[in-house]
Structure formats: C-alpha cells, structure tokens
Image: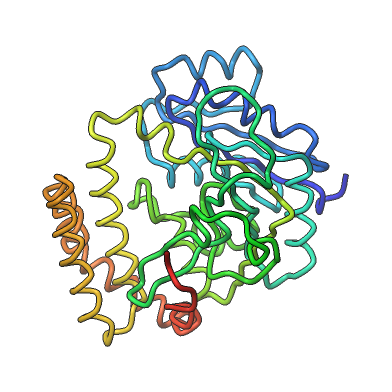
Amino acid sequence: MSEADSAAVVIPSWNSLDLLPRCLGSLRGQGAELEPLVVDNGSTDGSVAYLEEERVPHLSLPRNAGFAAAVNLAVARTAAEAILVLNADTVLEPRCVARLLGVLHRDASLGGVQPRILQLDERGTSAPPAPGSARLYSAGQALSADGRAFELGAGEPQRPEWLASREVFGVCGAACLLRRELFAELGGYDESYFSFYEDVDLNVRARIAGWRFEYVPEAVVWHVGNASWLESFERPRADNARLVARNRLATQVKFMPPSALPRIAAVEAGSLLRAARQRRFLATLRGKLGALLRLPTLIAERRRLGREGDVAAARRWLGAETPL
C-alpha cells in the first residue's frame, strides 16, 4: 500500500482490559495499512499482560500520565503521515480508516478529519447495533459564543443533516485522523491539560495556524464515553469537573477576545452555582483557580499565538453552531 493508504493508530489506555479486545479487533478490515500502538497509562487490571500475550505493539507507563501525554508519546514512536487517535472504548465500522484517509489526502489544507461518532451505551463485548438506529455522540466540535466547546449532534437521532459531510470547527479527540505535519507544527497536545479539553485546545491552535477540519459521516466509529475514567478514579465526576473547569478557562484565555470577558464571567459564575447544586462545587472551584494560577504562562501563550498566526481564524467559529 502507498503512504496515502496507511495510518498510525494511537490508543491511550487505562484499566481498559474489557474494552481493548473489541477496539483492537475492529482495526481489521479497514482497507488501510495500520501502525497500531497502545500506550498503557499504568493500568492495574491486567491490560499489559493481555497486550503482551496478544503481541500488540504497546508502551507501558509506570503511572497515569494523562491522555495528552500518552498520545504525544505514541505519535513520537510511530511513522505514518496520518495519525488516528482513538479512545480505548471505541469500535470502528469496516473501512472507516480508508474513508477518512481518502478525504484527508484530497485536500492539503485539512489538518484532520472526524468520523460520525455514535453512542455505544454498554461496555460488553457484543457487537454494536445497526448504525442507523443509534444516537450521535459527535458530528464534529463547535464553539459557543463564550468559547465553550460542545459536540455537534450529541444525543440526537441521526437526522439527514448529520449524514452530510461539512467543514467543522474541530475534531473530537475520541476518534479523529490528524495529519502528522499539523501535530509536529503545533507540538502535539498540551500535556498540562492531562485529560479533557486537550482536543479543543489543539483545534483552536490549529485554526490559528491556518488548518481546517472536516466531518466525514460515511466513516463510522462507536464510542462508550469516559468508560475507563468512570471506573478508575475514586471520585471520577469531581476530577472531571475540576479538569474541565481548569482546561476550559485555560483555552479561553489563549484566544478569546477581551470583549467576551463579561460573558465568560457570567457563564463561569453560573457553572459554580450548578456545581454547588450537584455537590461538586469545591472541585469546580479548584479547577478555575488552577487556571488562574497559570495566567502568566497562558497570557504568554496568547501573545505567541497572536504573533505567529491569525487568532481571528479561530474566533470566527464562536457561536457559528447552536449548542443543545
């Protein structure tokens, strides 16, 4: 196969032993030459023994370094010019990768493409239902007017508008095909994010650098969503709240216009009230304070992005789609 028919497949994994066989099995029949690499983030459930027994190429880390760092390590250890980033709780439909590669290589301005990601509601080993009967998990990423990210079509039935290809603000990190040139130019995911919003941040920086993204609905991936996270942390929802609050604010500082500050302040105040009702106020507050403590670094990054790229290229997507 030619270079255009190949892709590195990067799969960060953490205590995902019950998910990996189905994910890895779905890499067969993709119509492309694949270079898989699983990065195990310090699992304690026997994942590494399984990967060794099945002779799956993998990198075993002594502790959980986070999603962003795991992907960056895997990208550095693979060679294909296209990089398929996958969560361990995903399952690919046949020829998904071939379809994504075909679109990516038709347009040199595309930094990445995203499949139609469908919601898989269980963790078992049974086959997913028919694609047409499922609800969407993501048809691409979008930005609200205040700079929050959301997944297009999340939770919706698959109406005709979600079955047409389109340019989108960005791609979902659960399953996306990225051009290695983009990854190298941007320095990969920001590892300070650990997990959550690292894909949004990459999309923002890619837009500022002049890259585009496209949604490819004929390529289909199933996704459970936060499966390992929910089972492996003692307080997964609190840690989720803390990281999302911190990383969202960090991304907003990097590129949002000063005129949006009152809107952002109102939204953040509202999020604290919701967090209090949901008994995760302290976790959310810690996240926001964590971002504020990094303000000097974030402002320096904001100035660098402004010098080296077109920040308006990211800002023009603010509010371009309506969140649910």
Residue occupying the point 69% across, 57% down: 217
**Above or below: residue 208 compared with residue 102:** below
Residue at 58 percent of width and 48 percent of height: 175
Res. 237 image quadrant: top left
Position of 208 with respect to 175 (left or right) is left
Q: Is residue 3 above or below residue 200?
A: above
Q: Tell me if 108 is positioned left or right of 63 in this view.
A: right
In percent of the image, x 50 and y 36: which residue is there?
121
Whether 116 is drawn above or below 211: the answer is above
Residue 174, percent across and down? 52, 47
Tell me the quarter of the picture where residue 236 sits. Answer: top left
Image x and y of residue 271, in percent: 20, 61
Q: Is 177 displayed left or right of 218 in the figure? A: left
- Where residue 160 sits in the image (x, y, percent)? 68, 63
Q: Nearer the viewer, residue 126 or 97?
A: 126
The single residue placed furthest to the bottom in the displayed view is 259
The quarter of the rendered structure image containing the N terminus is top right
